[in-house]
Amino acid sequence: MSSNHTVSFRTKSGTELERVVFSFAVAFSDSDVRDRPLREGRGFSVELPAVLDLLDAVAAGQEKATDVRSMLLDAVDKIYDSASCYEYETHEDKLAWCKRDGGCRTCERSRRRFARHLETMAERWRRWTLHDEFPFAVGNSKGLHTVGCSVVRRHMPDGFITHEPGDEEALRAFAHADDDHDLTFAESGWASGDIPFRLMSAEETRAWMAENTGPKGGRHYKRCRVCAPTP
């Protein structure tokens, strides 16, 4: 979302500019020549009269162009967080910085969700080992199967690798895959053995079917034609 910000300047030589307006995300240039990182000005616009005043000061010998450039980039640095610039960074850069710094805000935002996800996956795997008690499975696309269905067995992992909530590498892979919707857990390097099916008892399955049936009897799920589950 675009935003406006004001910054006041006082240069080394004494030039003062009060409440200069900077805008972010109003326009992004499509020129490859001017493409650069956000922290170097991409996506930022500056109030033109202020820029002209600075150029006049440079032309009059009152300011050095290098000092003006540094001053503008310092303003970008000050605005970066309040303009939510981080959300516009590429997923590749976010991941690279996270690895370099040993953590990032993307990971911190996902920490609680990661812990809940680990609990969910561990419970799914526990149920997967108890076929008699939990004989039905539902996938992410709401397809209902029996646990012996070839569709289910084809997508279930051979084993399950447990992680602790404090496992920073697993958190990083989970958080950044979740942040980049085009990236799968496998592509992110997350070796958790993600469990793609929710395992249920017959009673739980009947309740789930009722919850996913509309008031006129329309089903919001698909019953597998291969295994024909009948809870």
Image: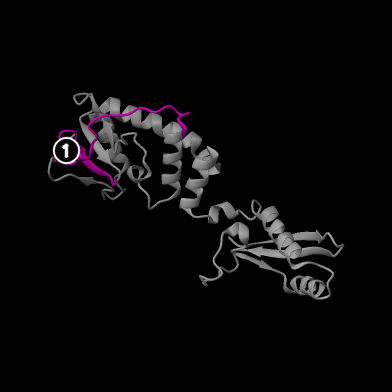
Asked whether, in this view, residue 185 is left or right of residue 55, the answer is left
Q: Position of residue 59 (x, y in %)?
A: 80, 75
Q: What residue range appears in magenta?
A: 141-168
Q: Quadrant of the N terminus?
A: bottom right
Amino acid under disc 1? Pro
Q: What's the residue at 78%, 70% (across, down)?
A: 54
Q: Is residue 174 above or below residue 36?
A: above
Q: Is residue 18 above or below residue 197?
A: below
Which residue is at a point 80% across and 60% down the rendered structure image?
9
Near mark 1 (Cα within 10 A), the count class, few <14, some 14-19 or many ≥20, is: some
Residue with the mark numbered 1: 229
Residue 23: x percent and y percent?
66, 64
How many numbered badges does the structure rendering display?
1
Which residue is nearer to you in this view: 147 or 114?
114
**Residue 45 image offset from top left, x and y in percent:** 65, 67
Q: Quadrant of the C terminus?
A: top left
Magenta span: predominant SS is loop
Residue 38: image quadrant is bottom right
Decide which of 226, 174 is in the foreground and name it: 174
